[in-house]
Image: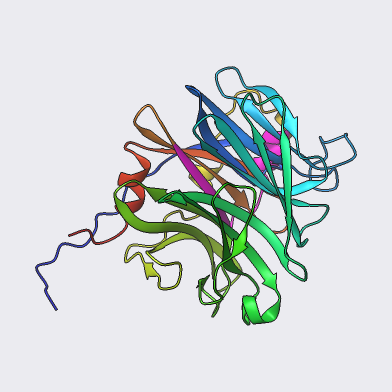
Amino acid sequence: MDFRKRAPKKPIIRKLGTIACDFVEATPIAYKEKLYRFEYVRPKKSNPANDTGSSYFHFVDLSDNSVVTELGKNHHLGCAYTDGEFMYASGIRDTWGGDTFTIFRSSDLTVWEEFPTTFPGWSIFNTGICKMNGIYTLLMEIDSPVEEAGTSPFTFRFAQSDDMINWRLTPSDCVFQKDRYAGGPAIYTFPHDPNYYVLYLEALPGGFYTTCIARGTDLKTWEYSPVNPVLMYDAAEDKRIANPFLTLAERERIEFAHDVNNSDMELCEWNGQTIITYSWGNQHGNEFLAEAVYDGTPHEFLSGFFYND
């Protein structure tokens, strides 16, 4: 062992505080020189403010906090991804754990095309999208079929596409962490870096959850960061108020909420910084959306959790 090898210095995340109640899955995303946040609006039983009668997705323009588009009625657990002129979103049709995911595509955030794909017998939850060498990769959080998911409650499998429309499953040895729980995923790639970076939720003893990171070049073998976790629950920081428009009732909910979880972390680059969203709460329905920032690019941030000779 080379004891002269310098261990990675854990990147410093500045938590800004809570911005919303009852939102979990969200993606900060830059598109056509504007910063947005894609959000999954859960049905009324999980988000009392949703009176539409169904779940859906929307994009928020962060320059004025206005909702600019709604899409994906009766879809769940979405994420967003942009490439060139197109904005994409993915979501699970009809129900959590469904076998059909839909890719939504738009060039103006107004008119959306829909491209569904079904993997019969699969139970799919959260997804993430990235691109490497012209090939798109879809990460899928699944809990069945058992031969794909293993014995853990949730694990990640992958599909790939040349056009974001037609998807093919990767071989079954392309899998992330079959031996134990993995949830709340996001996946990222960068030019001139051969790695896929995966953010995922690790379950700790006692019912606690924290976001960790791993990377790999082939979707089969994974290197875990020696300075995990990436994001640890901290009530003092998570419960800061970052949205001045939160009501007194919402602020009271935040103050008295049980905080055992930092999950569903996603990020994007904006003006040389890494903008981060994540969820905190009790992992059983009382959940909150928060923001954080890293003073550097996403590649500097994610690669900073590993040995880089």
At x 90% / y 39%, what residue is drawn? 53
Tell me if residue 170 can be seen.
Answer: yes
Q: Quick check: 269 left or right of 4?
A: right
Which percent across, then down, holds residue 48?
83, 40
Q: Nearer the viewer, residue 188 or 288?
A: 188
Which percent across, then down, holds residue 79?
62, 45
Which percent across, then down, holds residue 201?
54, 62
Residue lying furthest left: 4
Residue lying furthest right: 53
From this view, report whether residue 211 is shown above or below residue 29. Answer: below
Residue 261 in the magenta stretch? The answer is yes
Q: Which span is picked out in magenta?
A: 250-268
Residue 171 in the magenta stretch? The answer is no
Location of residue 138 (image quadrant)? bottom right
Which percent across, then down, holds residue 18?
58, 37
Query: Quick one: quadrant of the N terminus?
Result: bottom left
Location of residue 154 (image quadrant)? bottom right
Q: Nearer the viewer, residue 23 or 268?
A: 268
From this view, report whether residue 162 is shown above or below residue 6. Answer: above
At x 54% / y 51%, what residue is drawn? 162
